[in-house]
Each structure stands twice: as structure tokens, then as C-alpha cells.
Image (tube, rainbow, N blue to C red):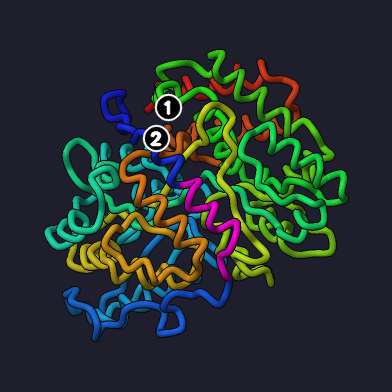
Amino acid sequence: MRSTSSTIRTRRVTQTAAAVLAGTLALALTGCGGDDDKGKEGQGGGPSESGSSLQLPKLDGQTLEVAAVWTGPEQENFTKVLTEFEKRTGAKVDFVPTGNNTSTFLGTKIQGGKPPDVAFLPQVGVLHQFADKGWLKPLGTEAQAQSSKNFSTGWQELGAYKGKQYGVYVKAANKSLVWYNTAAFEAAGITDAPKTWKDFLSTAQTLSDAGSPAVSIGGADGWTLTDWFENVYLSQAGPEKYDQLAQHKIKWTDPSVKAALTTLAQLWGKDDLIAGGRSGALQTEFPKSVTQTFSGDSPAAMVYEGDFVTANINADTKAKVGTDAKVFPFPAVGAQAPVVSGGDVAVALKDGKGPQALMTFLASTDAAEIWAAQGGFISPNKEMDQGTYKDAVTRDIAKALLAAGDDFRFDMSDQAPAAFGGTAGIGEWKDLQDFLKNPSDVAGAQSKLESDAAKAYKAG
């Protein structure tokens, strides 16, 4: 059961954090290179065993299983990290994709007596639920030492529950970014990135009038729609209201939710501004929302999502990050632009030397640098070499995250019980898909969101 007392203490977002993000991304808008700026990728893709002081046990003959949501380019990039772990320890590691319903997949495995050794949880609410059920193993001494050395207090607290450290947030996400096709902007005569929501809508209309589908939305994956809502809500309603809604201390029928949904409807209600219109968006999964922005005969001009968009750009299009594909902060709806972060937390589901060794490695700078060299990844690991990031745009995003310290707000849906904020086809994911289908029914969307939230929070 997930009680109110176990609700995550969310990090605070400040003017400083928003300013740092806007400042670093302003540099990305004007001059970052693409494949010519790959950090250390051309020198082996990260640290090797010979250059590392990290000590790992020999695990010859052992086979470990790791489960995570990633597929495609994200999975391939993570596999490079696992390959290095295998090389250093002698263990064999099998990767198992969980699908979008991570909590259901893992819960079934655990209850069936066959959990993976290590899993990545996309929702901190799931970490709390699993820890409360006794399904997670606390960090061992070596893994805890790496966590304490390499991560700020805020990120460590996100991986803890009732005073015990269970997880390490080795992969973070800045979810307050809009990526754009520079050719589409140039063709429409747009020279300045929009800074406010009003400017954003105006820019979208200008792009549409010039012949480009303005905004690509991956509505087939309901989680992308929760991210849209959270950025609008945080900027418009403010951090205090954001925390209250995240903890369900105010209802989804609150006027602040009505205001945010009404704001979203200004975009979602205009088929001419959305690639494929609303019906097309609801049939577009996240990877396609990226590729149709940077490839094809009639590419869209903009796609909203986190820094991990670069993994799909690099793998599935010919566009170069920093040249053909650039980025600007999510526009300010209220007084301040939002800074919403997410992440994937590594947890051990089995006892033993093998799972703890992998947790230790994942918490190290070695693993972070190997992963960063592949692209489509940022880490809250404050001790890693920032030069290992594949491109300057990603490096700026990562620096902004670290410069913000603990001053950010964590993804709201990821804090909720999985039945509301983390499961395909039900709860917030489904309710916002229904709202995208019919954005004129704000009251109906609020009512359904509140009904589903009330049930999920009560059940824990």
C-alpha cells in the first residue's frame, strides 16, 4: 500500500533553474555542432577497464537478467553499458524489455517467483509501492558508496523509501524541451524561438501557413500527453499547486486543472497545427513523432519531449543534432518557464553478489560515461566527465540539470500510483488521450481524471 506519508518530497523549481536552462539552450540554438562534436565517442566510447579504479567482483558463470522499458536505440545504447560490465566481471547479462506497463510486468514476474536481478522503474511511485511490499533489496555497501559520492542529496532521496536507499537514478530526463527542424523554421522565415505559450501558438500558425505540419504529437503513447500537461500546469499554476496535485491533495476538478486543460486545448483543438490532426496524433507513437519531424517528404516542424529525443534522431534519421535539429525550452505559460524532470531508477530485486555488483557499476562514473557517449542520454551523476556526451546540445542540457541542483519538479505522473499515472490504456494516460480526441470537453476530462485518481490513490 502507498500511504500519504510515503509520498515523495518533490524538488523545488526556482527562477534560477529556469534561467540556467534557458541560458544554456540559447547557446544550443545559435551554434552547437552535430557529429563533429562527439566528446570521447571516437576514442572508444567511454572508459575502459584499464583506466578505471572501480573494483568489481569476478562473476564468471553467472547470468543476470535486467529489465527496463527501453527498446530500439535506447536499448542498443544501454546494451553498451551491459557489455562493459560483462567484460569486467565475466558475468552474462540478458536484457528483457518490460513494455510500457512496467509495474504490471515486474509484479507478475515477482509474484511468479522469477523476478529479474535488476530492473529500471520509470515511476518513483512504483519504487514506493514495490519497497512497501518488500520486493526491493537495499543498496549494498559498495553501491551505496558510489551513490553517495556521485549523486546529489535530491537524487538520492528520490531513490529512497522510509529511510532506506533502494534505487539509483542513473538516467535522468529533462522533460521541458521542444525540438525543431531548422529547415522548416528557415522556410517559414522564423528566426527566434518562442519564449511564451502565446508566441508558441503564433509560431505554430506561421509554420502551418508556410506549409509545414507545425507540431508532431505522439498521442498513441499516453505518457507523452501527461508530460505536455505537466509543463503547462507547472508554469501556469505554480510549484505549490503542482505538488498538491501530485499528492492528490487537491482534486483534478480544481480550477487550476481547468485552466491548464483549456490552455492545452488551444493547441490540441486545432487540427491544422498538428501533424495528421488529432486522429493522426492518436495513432502516432513516440518514436514516430520524432522521425516524422526530422525525415520524410513533408516533415513536421516541432516535437515536444525530453532530451532522449536525440537517441531517435541519431538512430532513425539523417538529421544532425545541433545543425538540422535544435532545441528550445518549453515556453512559459505563466510567469516562469517550467523545469520538469524525470528519470529511470535502477533497483535490485534479488539478493546476491551479482545484482549488487551491477548496481555498483550503474551508479559509477564509468557506466555514466559509456552511456553518455552513445547519445540520447543524460545523467544526474555529478562526478562524471561531461566531455563524454556525444554532442554539445546534450552536454548543455546535462549541465543545466546539474546546475539546477535539487531545484526542479519531478514528473507528476511518475509520482502517482501506477494505476493512475503509469499504465497504458487506463488512468491519466487514457484520460488525456480522450481529451486529445475531444479537447472541447474540459469538464468531462476533469471529472474522469478525478474519478480515476481517487480510485488509484485510495488503493495505494
Quadrant of the drawing holding the C terminus: top left
Question: From what the image shows, is residue 377 above or below residue 103?
Answer: below
Question: From what the image shows, is residue 225 above or below residue 362?
Answer: above
Residue at position x 69%, y 31% in the image: 198
**Would you identify the image quadrant in which residue 91 lies?**
bottom left
Residue 65 image point, x, y percent: 36, 66
Q: Secondary structure at mark 1?
A: helix
Residue 13 image point, x, y percent: 39, 35
Kind of residue indicated by mark 2: Val
Quadrant of the drawing holding the N terminus: top left
Left or right placement of residue 406 versus residue 140 in this view: right
Q: Secondary structure at mark 2?
A: loop
Q: Are marks 1 and 2 in contact (CB under 8 Å)?
A: yes
Residue at position x 66%, y 50% in the image: 303
Q: Nearer the viewer, residue 102 or 43?
A: 43
Q: Which mark is residue 440?
A: none
The residue tagged 2 is 13
**Would you identify the image quadrant in which residue 428 lies?**
top right
Residue at position x 69%, y 45% in the image: 217
Residue lying furthest left in this view?
Answer: 141
Find the magenta span and give its range: 21-33
The residue tagged 1 is 239
Magenta-colored stretch includes residue 318: no
Label 1 Cα crowd, 10 Å radius (few <14 / some 14-19 / many 20+): many
Question: From what the image shows, is residue 207 above or below residue 53?
Answer: above
